[in-house]
Amino acid sequence: MNILLLGSGGRESAFAWKMSQSSLCGKLFIAPGNGGTAAYGKNILIDPNDFEAVKAVVLKENITLVVVGPEEPLVNGIHDFFLKDPALAGVPVIGPKKEGAILEGSKDFSKQFMARHGIPTAGSRSFTAATLQEGLVYLENHLTPIVLKADGLAAGKGVLILDNTAEAQEELKLMLSGKFGAAGTTVVVEEFLSGIELSMFVLTDGDHYVILPEAKDYKRIGQADTGLNTGGMGSVSPVPFAHEAFLKEVEQDIIIPTINGLKKDNIDYTGFIFFGLIKVNEKPYVIEYNCRMGDPETESVIPRIENDLVELFVATAQKRLHEVTLNISPKNAATVMIVAGGYPGEYEKGKSITGLDNLRQSMAFHAGTIAEGGVIKSNGGRVLAVTSLQDTQFDALQCATADAARIYFDGKYFREDIGFDLM
Ligand code: AMP
Ligand code: GLY
């Protein structure tokens, strides 16, 4: 079958790498892809949010499966667009419809969903411009630190953690008067939870689910988790503190109630659910849902999945996931993200990358790269994800970190401490 994968990051490189190994995979197209994905299929330079352009590719290339990497096309309704168009209705889309993607697209919705279905999460209340005064009083009466979240998609920037009530009140005013545009029309004010975070992933066909390997993502730019938040500087899988009993508890208290909650709410969900979790006193709480896989978690998770990924997607589309047994490698994966100097602030693009052939015990999943005249150049903030799969976590971390040092471009930066805090 011919497959179209939408997206252009390290996550999509890992998907493309894995899907291209499947005997079911005919031609693989990646739209728009990056400088590395052309090694696994054909890049097509269209915007995944331009649904008419996606339709044209599907029809021209006889695509019979579409896999959506990022959240934006899902939140914008790409799956609904396929279902509504008679020429596309028979082409399965891996990724939820709008009604399911709203779990990520609206934090207010996801908080109400969790409250309705008894899923453990931080206590919260939502406010709009009409209820600003109530919001200010609410902040007055709650302890700091306190968390303010823009309801809608804000490119990972819509969450503020504030240590001081007056500052939180000021920020609430700013957010409700348009600091994050339409995404901040509603603001969720949430209790601060103190603990350690991890990511869990489920692939569901709406009735059944498989639990993918868990991962931990490192969000801060600086060593030892300091400095600004980023899209993710590295990841590891498995996560040592996610022991068996804890994972069972996540399944019982969070995953099953989420799948059942979707059913009770008549939301027919096909695709990934990403549970952003925090472990507080040994108990799991949901920090957020995403309607897609994580990046850079995917780069550590996918290499541990021994199943044929296309087979998994076909079973998902056919609501046959209960027939699938997931085989997970006991090996340890570590991913170190190489970023452009200046990221997550301003940074330059177009730097020539060398050393990609020097990796000894890792693979490089391209993220923000572009191929220009046979040269791979940087083309984004997060440039390359270097992943190593080894028998021990220590070896995986060492190999990925050492190989990240073998790649060069002007201004490159990576964290040398990814995962070592877990040793
Ligand atoms: P989110 O966009 O919801 O993932 O939030 C971004 C980051 O903010 C999370 O990964 C956490 O590190 C932090 N965060 C969000 N909500 C809370 C909370 N209630 N308590 C503590 N930290 C939080
Ligand atoms: N690594 C976090 C995310 O993908 O949102």
Image (cartoon, rainbow, N blue to C red):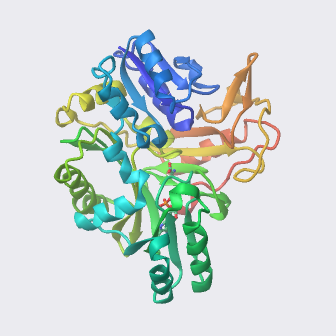
327 and 394: which is toward the camera: 327
Up-down: is 106 above or below 40? below
Up-down: is 359 above or below 57? below
Q: Is any atom of residue 170 visible in this view? A: yes
Quarter holding the N terminus is: top left
168 and 245: which is toward the camera: 168
122 and 310: which is toward the camera: 122
Up-down: is 140 above or below 189? below
401 relative position to 407: left or right? left
At x 69%, y 52%, the residue is 344
Direction right: furthest residue: 410
Q: Is any atom of residue 193 visible in this view? A: no
Q: Position of residue 319 (x, y in %)?
A: 20, 32
Q: Position of residue 378 (x, y in %)?
A: 73, 34
At x 44%, y 51%, the residue is 215
Direction front: furthest residue: 130
At x 34%, y 25%, the residue is 310
> Total marks drawn?
0
